[in-house]
Image (cartoon, helix red, strand yellow):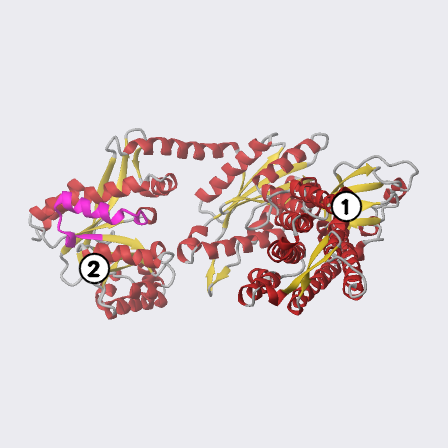
């Protein structure tokens, strides 16, 4: 080989090698960790290595030609075809799914087949020898090698088909550009490969055509790849902005100066209700904007000079499906291309605005009844006060508190309590005009703002209408509940000139209505404050009463009706206040429940009664039973049973000498919890009595489900025995039912001899009331015990 031939070989082989190595480095530098970059770089590097081994084959002696071809040139060439297939599969992975393991196996099938033939059959099965022509040396193919070359050609067709299929499925122009580059590269390679194959196999019998021409045709693929690299069809560091464009949930569109959409990312397709970018192209963005918001938009963008950029411009659009959406639009004029374009970034704020509206609504309205709340009412009241300063109109504030709402919660539960509140809200709305404002303050309190009343009587007439709304029952679970409402009214300018003052005085008037028996309305007067001040003073002293030992117990005797024997007593609390004197339970028990003091007071009552019961037990009254009332709040304490057990232990009173009295309303709302607690109390040996029987809900059901030993007939039924025959029948029924259920029956409020005789005839077991004795202080009760001398 002379010097001229050496230079020619160097140029022929090394220039393609350098070009492909450079291409490989450019690709891998873009994003080394991305699998597409790796496969593209590996394929290009293998092609470069193939050409380099061809060059080595020509430089070395002829006896080395076959070995280099068999073990270096063709394995590398076949491997490049396999990695090329994997590259195309990976590049189209977004739109075409191929099983990873099986696709890898198929891709490397030619290389595996090649090595199997070489291992089993040997070199002669693939190559028949070598041919030397002048300075050129090449291996001669055996027929089996044609199979390998055919598989490589089929792989080239597969690569082209994958590129075409992926382009057809692509949903945006950028993706279609990627696959268009691959299609061109594969087409150019196929054309070059076909021409080279025809030349090699067609003219070889007549002319010397080196086999290198087949391998040089592969360079076409690398050249095509390099030429179209400007489209960044493989992922790169610079690709991040394009990836953000496609992956961003925010809508991004490119518009011309007439607002015609030229390109749109997937976020824009979703926003406008489209699935394919082609469907959106050519449409004007303004056609989606609702009237009259789009007025002037097109004109502004049709101006010869770019319009002022939008910043957070809020618009309302209607998408392809007819759904309204609120959007924020930011625009920027881009001048990269000859005509320039507008880049619009669109954010869907529909949900954000709905949430903001919901938050605003919840901040100003009650979640249950959807009525305005306290905050909204106060703002409206202040605004109304401001507006009536210059007029002589009256402004009324009407505060409403339901009288017996707790009965529903205690008997049916809070679910039906909510249902009752909604019914009350509907009734009040039916009596309130648009001129006025109805709001719910919370709990069972409502408030009405009466605007622009001309005369005082107008407010009074309105109050009477509202009062009538409470006279009809509310039916829940087949049961009628007559709630009633206590209504307090204050009027501007007579009572106060401030919003806080008017509400405070309406509250005082409402308190006066409730204290007077409820279910009535009261107009504020200055002397009402005396009642409120008394309750404030009462609460102040009540909080100190326990520490000062101001509570005492009075005892009302219970008598066995058949024998006339004194067999027990009901312990009743009294408050001997240093400042207020003797305070009846009706004045402070409700206040104690409202303030939470009832738990400590109730525990003191049980402890004091048990201590006294032990003393009577030591005096020989071994069959004497003490009854103690338990409040609902006290009973529902989680540690109530433990506290009672500790009191019995410390007092040494026999548990059978203690009876705890509960009401039906205390247990029906939490029947399972109540049953468990009562079972634990009965297990200690304590008796359970149900007080005021017949006035609650589902009495028979309660009796059958709970471990109750004693039924106490409410005093109202005993009084009704004298009033009409039906009253006597009710008591008779209760006594008979109690005995059928093996319960003892106690009559409360026995005041006359006739009542006593009737109860004896009915077979009632025990009685208590003023006929025998009123509740007595301890000293007097001890005298009674001594006088009777029942042991």
Highlighted range, magenta: 635-659
Report x, y in % for residue 87.
Answer: 65, 54
Residue at horizontal 84 percent and vertical 53 percent from the top: 283
Decide if residue 100 is in sight here.
yes
Residue at horizontal 66 percent and vertical 67 percent from the top: 142
Q: Secondary structure at mark 1?
A: helix
- The numbered mark at residue 5 is 1
Residue 178 or residue 217, whichever sits in front: 217
State the residue position of label 2.
766
Residue 38: within the magenta?
no
> Is residue 407 left or right of 649 when viewed as pictured?
right
- What is the crowding at mark 1: few (fewer than 14 residues within 10 Å), some, or many (at least 20)? few
Residue at horizontal 46 percent and vertical 49 percent from the top: 403
Report x, y in % for residue 553.
Answer: 22, 42
Residue 646: within the magenta?
yes
Report x, y in % for residue 600.
Answer: 28, 39
Residue 111 against residue 515 in the figure, above or below: below
Whichever of callouts 2 and 1 sits on the residue coming sooner in the sequence is 1
Residue 15 or residue 789, whichever sits in front: 15
- The numbered mark at residue 272 is none
Q: Secondary structure at mark 2?
A: strand
Q: Main secondary structure of the magenta part?
A: helix
> Is residue 418 left or right of 546 when viewed as pictured?
right
Mark 2 or mark 1, which is nearer to you? 1
- What is the crowding at mark 2: few (fewer than 14 residues within 10 Å), some, or many (at least 20)? many
């Amino acid at each position: 080989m002379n010097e001229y031939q050496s230079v020619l070989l160097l140029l022929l082989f090394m220039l393609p090698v350098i070009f492909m190595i450079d291409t490989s480095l450019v690709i891998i530098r873009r994003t080394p960790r991305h699998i597409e970059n790796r496969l593209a770089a590996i394929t290009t590097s293998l092609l470069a290595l193939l050409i380099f081994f061809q060059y080595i084959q020509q430089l070395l002696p002829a006896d080395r030609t076959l070995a280099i071809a068999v073990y270096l040139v063709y394995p590398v060439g076949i491997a490049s075809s396999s990695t090329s297939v994997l590259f195309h599969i990976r590049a189209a992975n977004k739109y075409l799914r191929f099983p990873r393991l099986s696709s890898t196996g198929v891709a490397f099938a030619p290389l595996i087949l090649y090595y199997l033939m070489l291992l089993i059959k040997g070199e002669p099965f693939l190559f028949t020898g070598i041919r030397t022509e002048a300075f050129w040396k090449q291996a001669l193919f055996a027929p089996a090698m044609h199979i390998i070359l055919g598989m490589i050609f089929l792989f080239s067709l597969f690569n082209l088909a994958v590129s075409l299929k992926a382009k057809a499925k692509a949903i945006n122009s950028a993706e279609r550009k990627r696959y268009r580059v691959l299609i061109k590269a594969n087409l150019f390679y196929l054309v070059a490969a076909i021409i080279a194959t025809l030349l090699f196999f067609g003219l070889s019998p007549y002319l010397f055509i080196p086999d290198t021409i087949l391998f040089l045709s592969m360079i076409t693929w690398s050249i095509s790849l390099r030429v179209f690299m400007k489209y960044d069809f493989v992922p790169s560091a610079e690709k991040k902005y394009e990836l953000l464009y496609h992956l961003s949930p925010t809508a991004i569109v490119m518009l011309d100066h007439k607002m015609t959409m030229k390109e749109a990312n997937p976020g824009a397709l979703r926003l406008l209700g489209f699935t394919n970018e082609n469907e959106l192209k050519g449409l004007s963005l303004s056609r989606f904007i609702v009237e009259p918001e789009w007025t002037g938009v097109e004109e502004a963008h049709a101006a010869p000079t770019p319009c002022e950029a939008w910043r957070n411009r809020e618009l309302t659009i209607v998408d392809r499906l007819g759904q309204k959406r609120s959007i924020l639009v930011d625009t920027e004029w881009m001048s990269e291309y000859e005509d320039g374009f507008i880049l619009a970034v669109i954010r869907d704020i529909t949900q954000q605005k709905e949430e903001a509206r919901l938050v605003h609504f919840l901040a100003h309205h009650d979640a249950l009844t959807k009525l305005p709340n306290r905050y909204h009412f106060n703002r409206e009241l202040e605004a109304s006060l401001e507006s009536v300063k210059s007029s002589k109109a009256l402004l009324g504030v009407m505060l409403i508190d339901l009288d017996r709402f707790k009965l529903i919660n205690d008997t049916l539960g809070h679910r039906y309590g909510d249902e009752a509140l909604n019914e009350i809200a509907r009734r009040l709305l039916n009596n309130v005009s648009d001129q006025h404002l109805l709001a719910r303050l919370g709990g069972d309190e409502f408030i009405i703002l009466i605007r622009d009343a001309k005369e005082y009587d107008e407010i009074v007439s309105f109050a009477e209408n509202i009062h009538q709304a409470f006279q009809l029952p509310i039916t829940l679970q087949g049961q009628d509940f007559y709630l009633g409402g206590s209504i307090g009214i204050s009027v501007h300018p007579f009572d106060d000139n401030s919003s806080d003052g008017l509400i405070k005085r309406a509250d005082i008037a409402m308190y006066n209505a409730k204290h007077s028996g409820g279910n009535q309305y009261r107009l504020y007067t200055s002397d009402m404050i005396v009642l409120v001040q008394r309750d404030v003073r009462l609460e102040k002293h009540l909080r100190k009463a326990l520490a000062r030992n101001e509570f005492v117990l009075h005892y009302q005797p219970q008598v066995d009706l058949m024998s006339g024997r004194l067999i027990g007593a009901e312990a009743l609390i009294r408050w001997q206040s240093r400042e207020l004197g003797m305070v009846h339970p009706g004045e402070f028990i409700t206040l104690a429940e409202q303030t939470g003091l009832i738990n400590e007071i109730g525990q003191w009552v049980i402890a004091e009664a048990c201590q006294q019961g032990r003393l009577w037990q030591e005096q020989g009254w071994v069959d004497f039973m003490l009854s103690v009332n338990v409040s609902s709040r006290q009973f529902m304490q989680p540690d109530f049973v433990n506290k009672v057990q500790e009191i019995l232990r410390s007092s040494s009173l026999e548990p059978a000498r203690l009876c705890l009295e509960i009401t039906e309303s205390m247990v029906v709302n939490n029947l399972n919890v109540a049953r468990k607690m009562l079972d634990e109390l009965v297990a200690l040996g304590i008796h359970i009595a149900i007080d005021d029987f017949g006035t609650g809900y589902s009495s028979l059901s309660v009796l059958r489900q709970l471990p109750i030993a004693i039924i106490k007939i409410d005093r109202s039924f005993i009084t009704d025995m004298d009033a009409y025959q039906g009253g006597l029948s009710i008591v008779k029924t209760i006594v008979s039912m109690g005995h059928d259920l093996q319960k003892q029956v106690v009559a409360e409020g026995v005041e006359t001899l006739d009542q006593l005789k009737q109860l004896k005839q009915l077979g009632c077991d025990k009685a208590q009331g003023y006929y025998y004795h009123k509740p007595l202080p301890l000293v007097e009760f001890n005298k009674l015990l001594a006088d009777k001398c029942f042991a």
